[in-house]
């Protein structure tokens, strides 16, 4: 599905339809012209591996998958959200937060959202299957301002409540563990909020794939 949407085989793009191939080409071009410096700095601030290509390609695949989930049961299009996804965050005038997802170390994805980020369904994206990386969902995500300014305590609480409510709408406590890093952690940073998720498995559940990091997908129960 992702490859189909990123294909530029079609000579024309229907009016109102997102041209993902053109967006991806522009996004990659901006990153290459910058020698990935924005992405390198972004990963460094979050303490993530210096792998800007994993962030670049992961972001592109994540955005396309996001659009597929977004279209389910909606009449509005994804175009306004796609326009928000610029390589340089300062060029995204309507964005307020950056969400950076860790796809189990196989890739990373940084997406930009507005003040109300309900258009990004965290529970849906935790169900996404990443065939390119042979994994599904994500193990954590970070929320930051575009300029890395401090997240004040009230804002942190609001963000934590919003993301917890989003995930708990689909997952009960017996299905998914959610925990947020706070100032008790040695490497706590006031410029971003890190949220971890871990799906709970019953003893009878089967795991169809387990990678070198011990992560897998539940396939039966």
Image: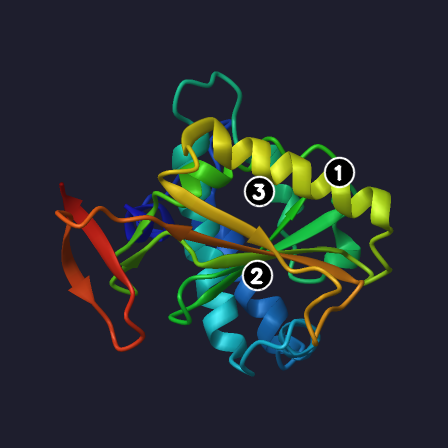
Q: Residues within 10 Å of mark 1 (few under 14, many from 20)?
A: few
Q: Are marks 1 and 3 in contact (CB under 8 Å)?
A: no
Provide the secondary structure element on which disc 1 rests: helix
Q: Residues within 10 Å of mark 2 (few under 14, many from 20)?
A: some
What is the quadrant of the C terminus in the image? top left
Q: Are marks 3 and 2 in contact (CB under 8 Å)?
A: no
Q: Residue at x 45, y 63 (%)?
A: 58
Q: Which residue does the numbered mark 3 point to in the structure image?
A: 82
Q: Are marks 1 and 2 in contact (CB under 8 Å)?
A: no
Position of 189 relative to 117 (above/below): below
Q: Residue at x 48, y 16 (%)?
A: 75
Provide the secondary structure element on which disc 3 rests: helix
Distance between the alpha carbons at the discs numbered 3 and 2: 11 Å
Between discs 3 and 2, the one toward the N terminus: 2
Distance between the alpha carbons at the discs numbered 1 and 2: 31 Å
Left or right of 96 on screen, residue 173: left
Q: Residue at x 51, y 48 (%)?
A: 178
Image quadrant assignment for residue 159: top right
Give whichever of 152, 68 is nearer the camera. 152
Q: Which mark is residue 76?
A: none
């Amino acid at each position: 599905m992702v490859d189909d949407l990123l294909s530029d085989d079609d000579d024309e793009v229907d009016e109102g339809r997102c041209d993902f191939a053109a967006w991806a080409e522009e996004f990659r071009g901006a990153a290459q012209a910058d020698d990935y410096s924005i992405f390198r700095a972004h990963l460094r601030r979050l303490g993530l591996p210096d792998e800007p290509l994993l962030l670049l390609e992961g972001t592109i695949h994540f955005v396309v998958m996001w659009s597929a989930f977004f279209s389910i049961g909606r009449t509005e299009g994804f175009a306004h959200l796609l326009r928000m996804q610029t390589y340089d965050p300062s060029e995204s005038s309507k964005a307020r937060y950056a969400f950076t997802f860790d796809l189990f170390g196989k890739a990373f994805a940084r997406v930009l959202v507005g003040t109300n980020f309900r258009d990004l369904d965290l529970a849906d994206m935790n169900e996404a299957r990443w065939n390119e990386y042979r994994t599904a969902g994500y193990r954590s995500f970070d929320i930051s301002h575009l300029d890395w300014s401090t997240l004040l305590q009230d804002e942190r609480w609001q963000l934590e409540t919003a993301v917890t409510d989003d995930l708990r709408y689909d997952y009960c406590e017996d299905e998914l563990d959610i925990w947020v890093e706070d100032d008790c952690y040695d490497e706590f940073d006031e410029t971003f909020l890190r949220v971890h998720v871990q799906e709970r498995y019953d003893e009878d559940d089967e795991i169809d794939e387990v990678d070198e990091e011990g992560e897998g997908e539940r396939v039966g129960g």
